[in-house]
Image (tube, coloured by chain):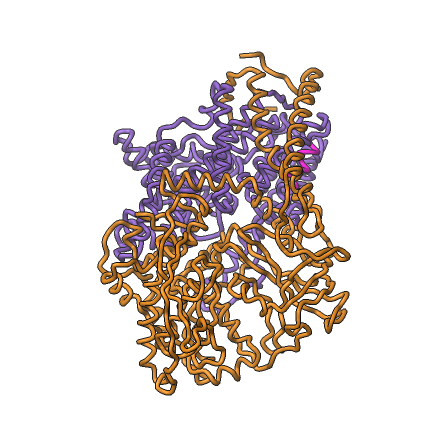
């Protein structure tokens, strides 16, 4: 029977013989089959970090139909570590290096500018994209069940209102980002004013009208740039230089001195600063995945470390101070070792020195929109504490205010309301008296981010456990929140794969005792602001029940055997395939009808 | 599962090929069907039930249509049931929210007060590829009813046809009649397999090396804030999108055809260098050929085609293009896109299937056609009618001027993008079509294309998640 609408298409003539065709097939099959085979054999034979073997391909069958997770979600999670296969890393790095060298091309996170200047791409979106006044339109292409997007204005207004009720003033300080002050390093053309998102002034006016004091120092920083021989921003980093930061701190301090509540506060603290040289590569080089290469030159800077006088103690936040500084990595840079530029010389220290008074500081990298407010509001008896404060200075990258829905979601910027806790802290069974060993079953899992879709290198995340074997005052049946590493240096760690129902032997310490984790990106656990503050713990070591606990990190040691076995498996498969094809071709198997040699 | 993903390339494909070729001839349809259901169920396993239901209904309808001694009425009832069920599935998942929203707006405009549809209507998730497989499945019953095909000998054969993973979610739309024979008897040759590899590699490279960079440039322009988009940038953004959608969609078709070839199938071509067209009429002969021929055969001709007078012909063209627009998405901007194409087709029909600029030199006709297409693509790409209108105004100088335009310009006019613009333009306007590139394929050229695949995979590692544009339809 003939279909009258049958489409006649040309059938290309193949001018290759059977042998050539088989070579092409072998090349292709080797390309798609050997890397996963190598990886799975290698993972199966490498030393395990936590007493458990993890074979990527087998994980697809590790699904609990009775669990909370859907099968579709399980498949998505199965895919994540596959994308992160170790063999992709050197390839990714080589391609990126070639793209930077040949075409000055960055990646999804970084744009390469002129003269070795790098720019964080979401920062550019925050200048030229949709903004808070005309938000990103909705479309059928978006997931209809996604969380509704809230821009910054409602959350800021609500926060200001809450603070007003405590008798505390909110001062919003949008920190100008690099392309606002150095647009010529990206565009090559000269500008006579700093760049801002076209909605910026309208948003600031709207916030001012609703009682939020906005101190926008963009113009002043622009003027300083014209006068300063030193750059105010690092070439290869998202953040400012020590000069830019110090200037901004001095200017902000000057603006704060004119606030009415300042008159009541003594400005009698003395600090001393010491210049220390440092060198390094900025975070943007890391986002390109080119750290450790010579693609970019190290930057040499001089930071000013701040010490209290008398005593010479390094600057430290004072939770009892009347002014709270909330901030992000602009506040943390030069104060947080994990950002790569050392500690002791951050924005808070310089602001305190300029003001001559102590500061209460909450600064979290990338979480100035909600995370820092959440931390402030969830402190024990936060409401009572805030009645003692005079002001909250909220210094955050202006970028966060102007990202529209899609780039905001990609960078993890969310604007949520918070509620100040009236109650005190829950009693801690592990109150700073050393680690305890318990066994628990995972009863709730918080989803870590995909390391390839976020800009930071490390993340910790919480799991909720029900204790099955207690120790000290942690009793069987207790529920505890335990933080683990989700990933480090972009590599997912074993805990990221723990599922509800898994049992683990844990060595716990209070999270608050791990000062080195305070600035690491973290997934928040659900907070009930009306209940006593739960004590989150840190899993110092983890193991399967019955085994010796081991630190949560990738194991070290010789991997040669695993590599050799993986390579051997690939060779064996190739040999088997060759023999099978030969046998098939000889028997013809009713399947292959090779055309004559061309 | 997405072709341009780690899971597909390094896990699904080798395992599927291994299972397929390790299975004796009699079991191949089953293996292929199971692999296709795994492929499709990867997005949401529940949606495989929907596909299975659609398949079962159409198979049963086919049985009814071809039953010995079936009366014309029974045959017609079978066909109508199949069409009604498929359109209902499509209507529920794709158009319920659109119609409910517009009905609510209309009711308010007419002063009938707020008529709210249940909230779940607006939260229905569109199953990937539903527009493609419902059309395919439905075409089976229609072809049987018309006597253009024989019924599938078994449910498995039919399920295999509907679910074939290479072309399941984004075409080409393969009609049952064109693969019925191949479902039973396929010739597997090493040369055919190598040809499939070459075609798949070409498609993969097009997607990663051309479509994705152009997509990033287009995204920047279409996401520009108020006052940022200048006229030149707006045109460049539309141009970037035109290249993105062409290289993305034709890449998918290349990969589908290549995968089909690896499995012994020959699927119809879907593109014929569409941007070389000198009129919109010619464009529709070259663009998404499997959809345009589907609409021609199953909609335009049944509506009367050009057999019922001039006015009716124009009306039919408009109806077909409006529904073609709506097929792409349940939004007014897709309808506007269809309306512009329908108007152009009718106008060209009035002028003897020639563009109103038909007397210009050929190069200028091609340029003019591309210019018109750029405007229509704005309606296709923009999030909604308001966004499309603002973008069109920006194209004609009513947009930016803010200094922040320089930031957008710096992103769009990066050296790499300029390189890709030139490359895409060169290929779109001057290179032969994909199938012609496969002509006289030698082992060396095929191996080079596999090398191109390796380069594209390496670049893919530096890119993020990159689904195909047509998945959303």
Which residue appears farthest toward the bottom when viewing the image?
A: A264
Quarter of the image for residue A434 reads: bottom right
Residue B39 spot, x, y in % from top left: 62, 41
Q: Which residue range is magenta in the image? A: B29-38
Residue A65 spot, x, y in % from top left: 73, 53
Residue A42 spot, x, y in % from top left: 65, 39
Left or right of B414: which side holds A438? Answer: right
* Chain letter, colour purple in render: B
Residue B36, magenta (yes or no) = yes
Label tally: 0
Left or right of A75: which side holds A384? Answer: left
Residue B18 spot, x, y in % from top left: 66, 30
Between B170 and A481, the one lying in front of the other is A481
In this orientation, does residue B220 appear?
yes
Which residue occupies 62% across, 50% down? A554
User: In this structure image, what is the colour of chain A?
Assistant: orange
| For residue A366, above or below residue B445 | below
Q: Quadrant of the N terminus of chain B?
A: top right
| For residue A77, above or below residue A377 | above
Which residue occupies 62% across, 43% down? B40
Quarter of the image for residue A132 reads: bottom left
Residue B437, magenta (yes or no) = no
Which residue appears farthest toward the front when viewing the image?
A: A311
In this orientation, does residue B225 appear?
no
Which residue occupies 67% across, 29% down? A573
Quarter of the image for residue B177 reads: top right
Between A368 and B127, the one lying in front of the other is A368
Between A109 and B178, the one lying in front of the other is A109
Magenta span: chief secondary structure: helix
């Amino acid at each position: 029977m003939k279909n009258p609408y049958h489409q006649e298409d040309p059938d290309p003539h193949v001018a290759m013989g059977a042998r050539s065709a088989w070579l092409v097939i072998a090349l292709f099959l080797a390309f798609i089959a050997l890397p996963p085979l190598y990886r799975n054999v290698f993972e199966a034979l490498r030393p395990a970090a936590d007493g458990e073997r993890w074979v990527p391909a087998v994980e697809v069958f590790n699904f609990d139909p009775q669990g909370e997770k859907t099968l579709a979600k399980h498949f998505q999670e199965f895919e994540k570590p596959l994308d992160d296969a170790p063999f992709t890393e050197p390839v990714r790095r080589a391609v990126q290096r070639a793209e930077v060298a040949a075409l000055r091309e960055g990646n999804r996170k970084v744009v390469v500018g002129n003269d070795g200047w790098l720019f964080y791409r979401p920062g550019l979106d925050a200048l030229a994209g949709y903004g808070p006044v005309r938000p990103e339109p909705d479309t059928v292409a978006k997931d209809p069940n996604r969380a509704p997007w809230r821009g910054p204005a409602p959350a800021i207004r609500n926060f200001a209102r809450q603070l007003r009720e405590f008798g505390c003033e909110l001062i919003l300080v949008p920190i100008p980002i690099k392309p606002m002050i150095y647009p010529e390093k990206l565009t090559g053309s000269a500008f006579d004013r700093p760049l801002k998102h076209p909605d910026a002034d309208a948003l600031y006016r709207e916030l001012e009208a609703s009682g939020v004091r906005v101190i926008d120092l963009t113009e002043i920083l622009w003027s300083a740039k014209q006068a300063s021989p030193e750059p105010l921003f690092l070439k290869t980093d998202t953040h400012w230089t020590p000069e830019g930061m110090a200037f901004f701190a001095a200017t902000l301090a000057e603006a704060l001195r004119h606030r009415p509540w300042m008159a009541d506060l003594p400005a009698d603290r003395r600090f001393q600063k010491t210049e220390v040289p440092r060198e390094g590569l900025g975070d943007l080089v890391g986002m390109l995945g080119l750290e450790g290469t010579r693609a970019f030159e190290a930057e040499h800077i001089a930071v000013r470390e701040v010490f209290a006088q008398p005593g010479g103690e390094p600057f430290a936040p004072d939770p009892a101070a009347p002014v709270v500084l909330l901030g992000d990595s602009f506040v943390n840079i030069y104060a947080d070792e994990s950002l790569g530029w050392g500690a002791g010389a951050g924005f808070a220290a310089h602001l305190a020195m300029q003001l001559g008074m102590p500061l209460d500081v909450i600064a979290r990298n990338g979480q100035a929109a909600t995370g820092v407010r959440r931390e402030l509001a969830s402190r024990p008896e936060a409401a009572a504490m805030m009645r003692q404060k005079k002001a909250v200075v909220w210094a955050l990258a202006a970028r966060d205010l102007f990202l529209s829905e899609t780039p905001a979601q990609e960078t993890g910027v969310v604007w949520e309301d918070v509620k100040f806790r009236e109650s005190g802290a829950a009693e801690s069974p592990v109150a700073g008296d050393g680690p305890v060993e318990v066994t628990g079953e995972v009863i709730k899992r918080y989803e870590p981010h995909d390391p390839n879709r976020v800009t930071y290198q490390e993340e910790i995340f919480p799991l909720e456990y029900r204790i099955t074997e207690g120790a000290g005052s942690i009793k069987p049946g207790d529920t505890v929140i335990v933080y683990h590493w989700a990933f480090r240096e972009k590599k997912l760690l074993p805990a990221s794969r723990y599922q509800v129902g898994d049992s683990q032997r844990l060595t716990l310490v209070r999270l608050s005792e791990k000062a080195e984790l305070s600035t690491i990106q973290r997934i928040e656990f659900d907070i009930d602001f009306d209940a006593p503050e739960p004590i989150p713990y840190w899993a110092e070591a983890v193991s399967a029940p019955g085994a010796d606990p081991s630190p949560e990190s990738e194991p070290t040691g010789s991997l040669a055997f695993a590599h050799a076995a993986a390579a051997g498996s690939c060779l064996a498969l190739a040999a088997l395939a060759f023999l099978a094809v030969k046998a098939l071709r000889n028997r013809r198997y009713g399947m292959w009808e090779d055309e004559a040699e061309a | 599962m997405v072709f341009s993903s780690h899971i597909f390339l390094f896990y699904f494909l080798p395992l599927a090929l291994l299972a397929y070729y390790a299975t004796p001839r009699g079991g191949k349809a089953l293996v292929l069907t199971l692999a296709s259901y795994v492929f499709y169920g990867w997005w949401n396993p529940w949606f495989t039930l929907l596909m299975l239901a659609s398949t079962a209904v159409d198979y049963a309808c086919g049985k009814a249509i071809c039953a010995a001694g079936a009366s014309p009425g029974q045959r017609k009832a079978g066909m109508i049931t199949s069409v009604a069920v498929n359109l209902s599935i499509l209507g529920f998942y794709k158009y319920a929210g659109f119609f409910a929203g517009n009905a609510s707006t209309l009711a308010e405009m007419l002063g009938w007060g707020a008529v709210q549809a249940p909230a779940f209507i607006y939260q229905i998730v569109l199953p990937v590829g539903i527009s493609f497989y419902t059309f395919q499945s439905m075409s089976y019953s229609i072809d049987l009813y018309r006597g253009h095909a024989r019924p599938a000998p078994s449910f498995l054969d039919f399920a295999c046809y509907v679910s074939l993973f290479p072309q399941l979610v984004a075409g080409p739309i393969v009609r049952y009649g064109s693969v019925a024979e191949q479902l039973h008897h396929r010739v597997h040759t090493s040369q055919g397999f190598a040809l499939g590899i070459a075609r798949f590699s070409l498609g993969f490279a097009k997607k990663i090396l051309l479509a994705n960079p152009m997509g990033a440039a287009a995204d920047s322009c279409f996401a520009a804030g108020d006052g940022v988009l200048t006229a030149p940038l707006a045109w460049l953004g539309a141009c970037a999108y035109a290249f993105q959608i062409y290289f993305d969609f034709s890449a998918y078709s290349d990969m589908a055809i290549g995968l089909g070839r690896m499995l012994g199938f020959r699927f119809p071509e879907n593109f014929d260098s569409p941007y070389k067209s000198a009129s919109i009429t010619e464009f529709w002969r070259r663009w998404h050929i499997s959809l345009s021929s589907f609409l021609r055969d199953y909609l335009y001709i049944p509506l009367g085609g050009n057999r019922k007078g001039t006015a009716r012909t124009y009306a039919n063209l408009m109806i077909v293009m409006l529904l073609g627009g709506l097929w792409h998405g349940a939004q007014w901007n897709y309808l506007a896109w269809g309306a512009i194409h329908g108007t152009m087709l009718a106008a060209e029909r009035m002028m003897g299937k020639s563009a109103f600029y038909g007397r210009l030199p050929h190069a200028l006709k091609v340029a003019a056609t591309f210019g018109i297409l750029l405007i229509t693509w704005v309606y296709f790409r923009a999030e909604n009618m308001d966004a499309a209108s603002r973008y069109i105004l920006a194209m004609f100088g009513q947009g930016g001027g803010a200094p922040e335009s320089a930031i957008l310009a710096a992103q769009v006019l990066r050296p790499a993008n300029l390189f890709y613009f030139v490359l895409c333009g060169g290929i779109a306007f001057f290179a032969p079509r994909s199938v012609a590139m496969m002509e006289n394929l030698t082992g060396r050229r095929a191996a080079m294309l596999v090398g191109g695949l390796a380069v594209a995979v390496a670049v893919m590692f530096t890119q993020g998640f990159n689904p195909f544009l047509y998945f959303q339809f």
